[in-house]
Image (cartoon, grey):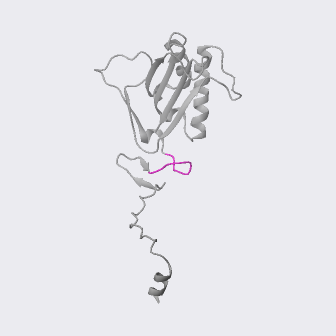
Amino acid sequence: SSSSSSSSSPSTHKTAPPRRPPPPTTTTTPRASSGGGAALRGGGPTAPRVRRHDTKVATHQRRLCVPLARWVDAVHVEGPVLFVSAQIGADASGVLQPSAELQCLQCFENLRRALHAGHRTVRDVAKLTVYMVHGQCGLAEFRLAAGRFFPDDALPAVSIVFVVALATENILVQIDAVTA
């Protein structure tokens, strides 16, 4: 009977090559890690929180140069990581602050809100990247704002990049962060 069904239809049907099994899926199941912290595959809002003291360790090297502002040389992290997109100096209604100093302060307030939404605090910040428009925003404004934001015992690693311009001509600074 199988020959009658194959003879009634033309032989245009080709056999598909065998399919490879799909790659393993990402899970949010905690797994043990060395060093006392919990590591996750995936992460997300349902992931268990790992306290900062279990995941972030600041390193100071005596042989490295003296930093231009308050930050640490390196930060070792374990466990779930949160990447916060660049925050600019605009308030919740979209109004951009008029000065470099106020934009820096607003960037940090926006960063604080983004961290809160990600179930993190300023103590969880391991790395900042700061972009400032050269000649219009400087280290003094950044130091003032960062000093109000970070306690002395929770300083992150920091990279500061001076640029010609940011997304629009009135944005003078933007700050992104990585947390542990």
Asked if residue 47 is among those painted magenta in the image, a careful observer would answer yes
The x, y position of residue 47, in whole percent, is 52, 50
Please state the horizontal and vertical placement of residue 170, each as a whole percent of the image.
Answer: 62, 17
Rendering coords of residue 45 (x, y %) = 56, 48
For this rendering, which residue is in front, 137 or 59?
137
Q: Is residue 174 left or right of residue 37?
A: right
Give left or right: position of 60 versus 88: left
Q: Quadrant of residue 17?
A: bottom left
Residue 96 percent across, percent down from the top left: 66, 21
Residue at image coords 55%, 25% = 149
Classify residue 58 by image quadrant.
Answer: top left
* Residue found farthest to the top: 135
- Residue extent of the magenta highlight: 41-49
Residue 23 falls within the magenta-colored stretch: no
Q: Residue at x 48, y 45 (%)?
A: 50
Up-down: is 163 above or below 118? above
